Amino acid sequence: MENNPELPWTGERFVPRYTGQLLYEHTGQLLYEHLHRYAVAAALADGKRVLDIACGEGYGSNLLAATAAQVIGVDIASEVIAHARQAYRKENLIFREGSCLNIPVEDHSIDLVVSFETIEHIDEPLAFLQEIKRVLAVGGALIMSSPDKAEYTDRTGVTNPFHKRELYHEEFLLLLKQHFKRCRIGKQKLVAGSWIAADDLAAEDTFGTFSGDIHSIAFRPGVYRGVYSLALCSDARLPAWKLGVYANSPESEKIWNLLERFGSPEKIQNTVATVASLEQRAARQAGLLAQLRSHLGELRVGLTRTQARVDELTGDLRRQLLATKKLTWLLSETEKTAARLRASRRWKIANPFAALKSKAMGIWKRLFPIICNGARIIQKSTKSMNRSGDSSTPRSGLRHDSPAQMEVLRCQSLRPLPPSLSSSPSATQWMFR
């Protein structure tokens, strides 16, 4: 089988899937039901011209082509036919797109028509059977299957939405007898049990189903409570059927090992339910892990930005430390220069004069208010004496041109300096002019 995109599972048709080792992924009910039917049909197809109507994915037509002279697979879905043409390629295998009510095959050109699980999907079953009769050659045969409504739907309570009309086992046989002179009918059912068969079958041998327990055993001919009806029909003599068990030994061993391990199907079902619950929990944990990984990614982005900011601040700090180191060096050099200056001869000469000047300034600041207050008192006394005496001939007191009078006038012209100017060199020079 070549690489080919798989068809989607819709529930309308069986779609087998393969793993890398070409093993079926589906190992459940549908697989064995379909393979068993095609095994019976392949035994009838030896050397014949075969039509597989409603062939679906094409695996059945491919199985028939192993023994048939030619196989034509027909299906109404174009995408299914396109898939089958790519997936299954043999010289004696052809796939055509067409309807069950208008089969793209010439009249009386088919020796064996294979129709499995198809008639229940059609609104006009009579027209379908008439179309099958048209393409069958003289002496040709039909092998057909359909679910028994009593077991498939009534007993289970499950309705298949793709089925147009389901038939009971007896209705199915009656419908086929209306179109064919000879019919043989049987049933199919999946079982877990034991199979006994003779090496050589005799005419008096009876095939049937045993059932029961340690208290009683019963036998019924054929397949007891079979789910699917299977019929072989023809207007001529019917070919011999090859019927039996479709066994898969590895799968059977697994099933029995499970029963041995768990004791009953109920315990297996409970274990499966537990596993399903654990799988759901694992899925939730996987979702949470994905969220955590996403959050971790966001944190990593934030960490990268923070690291970039730290690197930026580290660069600023290094520059500040370098500037501080430089200022420390300049301060050290300034202190060295000041020490050299204080140790110099010029500083030793200028320093006493600066101290004397500062001391004189302190004395002046203390005497200045006293002098000014005395000058105000003298001025006030002079004005008082002038008012009491003759203004043209002063009797006693100071003359205007006396030294005391001149000092009063000088004090009146003086004003205390602001504190901001009193310590400046220019203010000091003004005071000692």
Image (tube, helix red, strand yellow):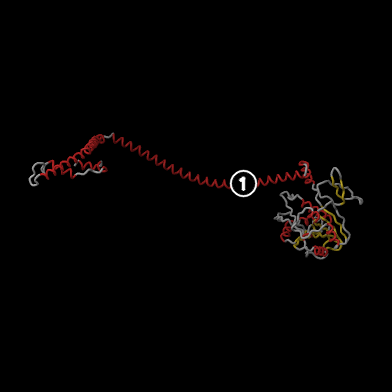
Q: Which residue is mark 1?
A: 288
Relative placement, left or right, of 86 versus 141 is left
* Residue 422, picture quadrant: top left
User: What x and y, as percent, mark residue 202?
Assistant: 91, 50
User: What x and y, as percent, mark residue 300?
Assistant: 54, 46
Quick check: 358 above or below 178?
above
For the residue marked with disc 1, what is the amino acid? Leu
Viewport quadrant of the N terminus:
bottom right
Toward the viewer: 92 or 350?
A: 350
Toward the viewer: 396 or 433?
A: 396
User: How many numbered tags mark residues here?
Assistant: 1
* Residue 174, picture quadrant: bottom right
Relative placement, left or right, of 346 versus 128 is left
Toward the viewer: 66 or 364?
A: 364
Relative placement, left or right, of 10 versus 420 is right
**In this rendering, does residue 73 appear at all?**
no
Quick check: 396 above or below 22?
above
User: What x and y, as percent, mark residue 330?
Assistant: 35, 39
Q: Give the residue drawn at x 92%, y 51%.
A: 204
Binning the other alpha carbons within 10 Å of mark 1 as few (below 14), some (14 to 19) or many (20 upward) gives few
User: What x and y, as percent, mark residue 55?
Assistant: 77, 58
**In this rendering, does residue 174 appear at all?**
yes
Disc 1 on helix, strand or loop?
A: helix
* Residue 81, picture quadrant: bottom right
Viewport quadrant of the C terminus:
top left
